[in-house]
Amino acid sequence: MATDERADAVDRIVDEWRAVRPDLDVSPMAVVGRLSRLARLVDQRLAQNFAASDIESWIYDVLATLRRIGPPHELSPTELVAHTMVTTGAMTNRIDRLIERGLVERDHDPDDRRRVVVRLTADGLALVDRVAPGHYEVEHQVLAPLDRADREALAATLRSLLLHLGDEA
């Protein structure tokens, strides 16, 4: 059980496993289970913010990627795949759907007609700029119980785990 007076669902699950299989070291579940549950809860909170603007997380992900790279807010589809970690097929579908909504446009690079770029439209730029403050406010609320030092330590620990599992910049 948790060392403090408060327990969560993961504590219960770990305790149940320890009771029926004391031979297994289920201690990693204390971290991995919490990471999994945390990801779902954070995604739910973020989805509520996105729904208020009639978008989904994948829409924000693509628009924010184009926004944060700076003017002219364009990348090739391959570059978008690398920045968002989805498959090329999924990205093609996403780009097509964003074009239908008037949030991005697909064009040929004026310097290399063989290269296609995806660019934020004025409507796409306005949307991501409107949604971003609420998005980061939700993230601040999620992390509210942690002070700056705890956030930095957690970020460093999670970075180490991601790099260990093969994630890269």
Image (tube, rainbow, N blue to C red):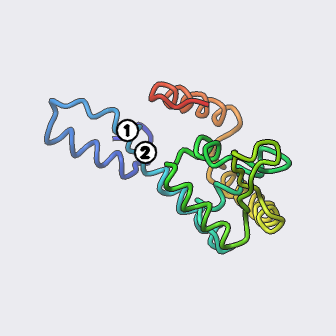
164 with respect to 72 (left or right) = left
Q: Secondary structure at mark 2?
A: helix
Which residue occupies the foreground of this view, 15 or 68?
Answer: 68
Where is mark 2, residue-wise? 34
33 with respect to 92 (left or right) = left
126 with respect to 39 (left or right) = right
Residue 22 screen position, x and y as percent: 16, 33
Residue at 62% from the left image edge and 53% from the top image edge? 142
Q: How many marks?
A: 2
Please tell me the numbered disc located at residue 30.
1
| Amino acid type of the residue that numbered disc 2 sits on in the rendered structure | Arg
The quadrant of the image that shows the N terminus is: top left
Residue at 34% from the left image edge and 38% from the top image edge? 29
Which residue occupies the foreground of this view, 65 or 162?
Answer: 65
| Amino acid type of the residue that numbered disc 1 sits on in the rendered structure | Ala
Find out whether the residues at labels 2 and 1 contact each other: C-beta distance under 8 Å.
Answer: yes
Which residue occupies the foreground of this view, 8 or 69?
Answer: 69
Near mark 2 (Cα within 10 A), the count class, few <14, some 14-19 or many ≥20, is some
In the image, residue 54 sits, relative to residue 151, either above or below, namely: below
2 with respect to 137 (left or right) = left
The quadrant of the image that shows the C terminus is: top right
Residue 138 screen position, x and y as percent: 67, 58
Residue at 58% from the left image edge and 46% from the top image edge? 81
Q: Secondary structure at mark 1?
A: helix
Give the quadrant of residue 141.
bottom right
